Amino acid sequence: MHQVLNKNISPLKNFDIKKIREDFPILSRMVNGKPLVYLDNAATSQKPQVVIDVLQNYYQNENSNVHRGVHFLSDRATNLYEEAREKIQKFLNAKSTKEIIYVRGTTEGINLVANSFVKPRLNEGDNIIVSLMEHHANVVPWQLVCDEKKAKIKIIPINKKGELLVDSLHGLIDEKTKFISVVHISNSLGTINPINEAIEIAHKNNIPILIDGAQSVCHGSVDVQKLDCDFFVFSGHKICGPTGIGALYGKEKWLEEMPPYQGGGDMILQVTFEKTIYNDLPYKFEAGTPNISGAIGLGTALDYVQSIGYENLHTQENLLLKYATEKLSKIDKVQIIGTADNKASIVSFVMADIHAHDVGTILDQEGVAVRAGHHCTQPVMDYFGVPGTARASFSFYNTLEEVDILEDAVKKGIKIFLG
Ligand code: PMP
């Protein structure tokens, strides 16, 4: 253990953390007179210079609207935009680019599926199953369609370690179950869920399933064909890409059946006042001028993360998780919320009765950025009987030294509040 945690040892020979950090200009800035220690990666990741450059270059040299133009720049923008879609397709190992829909992010992707796929199939008395550890983005869209259709939501429970009791799906599913939607990695607990099992159970019962991958694509590779999920959604900003762009993967057979989510330009082949013919996939779901620069930036971000290598990323993040868990759990008055056996590099904790926002504020004074509150997972907070937690979430560009700074800041906070 000690050897692994020796800060002078780089986890892998070809992983130069110093060089990687230099790729992210924001990491060298000061906050409140202290070097920034950015541990809020589950909320959004920082952006490498290559992504910043590609955005600037797009607006400086290539800006134009896509699909509709015959001129040079429009053609160029369209090619870059569609190349990015191919990158996402390969990244998720989808069968075709027809299965990749650009969306604003995870939230929009789930709303699209709720409204276009599930709502038309839902009747009074039916049910949709989600887990107790869902982000509000994977709760509220289902509540909206269930309210409208007089259907119900059923909940997969969790245990005190924050692990999903996936077997309980067998008892929850009945002939009225129309859809299942489960988070891959919990943003507030860090739990990595057994989604393979959830997908298998869903399909044995002929129920389509969506996986919320908002927190998972940044921690490991995802293969939607191997998983065999019906839908998978993620946000670009959590994997080094820009905000306002993400992708929804859907099996082509489902997407073909689904009506458009929004109407407007680009999603049509022909419009008359009598009848409109919709465009082919994936454009049927992409009404209006899209986030062109965002898509191009996301493509570059995926290239960047893949160039780091998931093996390197895993090793570094697991090291940080282990080290932070060990350090924080040794501090009297600190309790870690979410102690699943299979966890990503997210550590949520409470400090005695100190309000999470006060913890966040104290840490901020030391330059340490953590998220404080319910993390848009209020049912999880209710389950653990806390109003909120402080959450340190680590990326591959974080260091063990930063964990030390977090530890010192936490200890300082305890002294200030508890004497
Ligand atoms: N699901 C999970 C698990 C998340 O962590 C988040 C973002 N915190 C979302 C959904 C929503 O993502 P976005 O706000 O990017 O749409």
Image: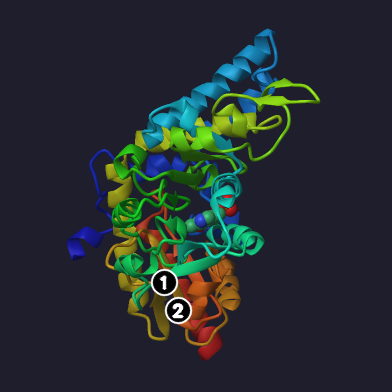
Q: Quadrant of residue 366?
A: bottom right
| Residue 191 quadrant | bottom left
Q: Is residue 147 left or right of residue 413?
A: right
Compared with residue 357, is residue 230 higher up or lower down, i.e. above or below?
Answer: above
The scheme the figure's colours follow is rainbow
Kindly indicate whether the residue at mark 2 contacts the one at mark 1 (C-beta within 8 angstroms): yes
SS of the residue under disc 2: helix
**Residue 407 got which mark?**
1
Q: Position of residue 18 (x, y in %)?
A: 38, 44
Rendered location of residue 102, percent (x, y): 57, 35
Closer to the camera in the image, 119 or 57? 119
Q: Are there few (<14), some (14-19), or many (20+) residues within 10 Å of tag 2?
A: some
Could you classify mark 1 by the number of other residues whose Cα lies within 10 Å: few (under 14), some (14-19), or many (20 or more)?
Answer: some
State the quadrant of the N terminus. Answer: bottom left
Determine which of the numbered discs, if any, sits on residue 411 in the image.
Answer: 2
Amino acid beneath label 1? Glu
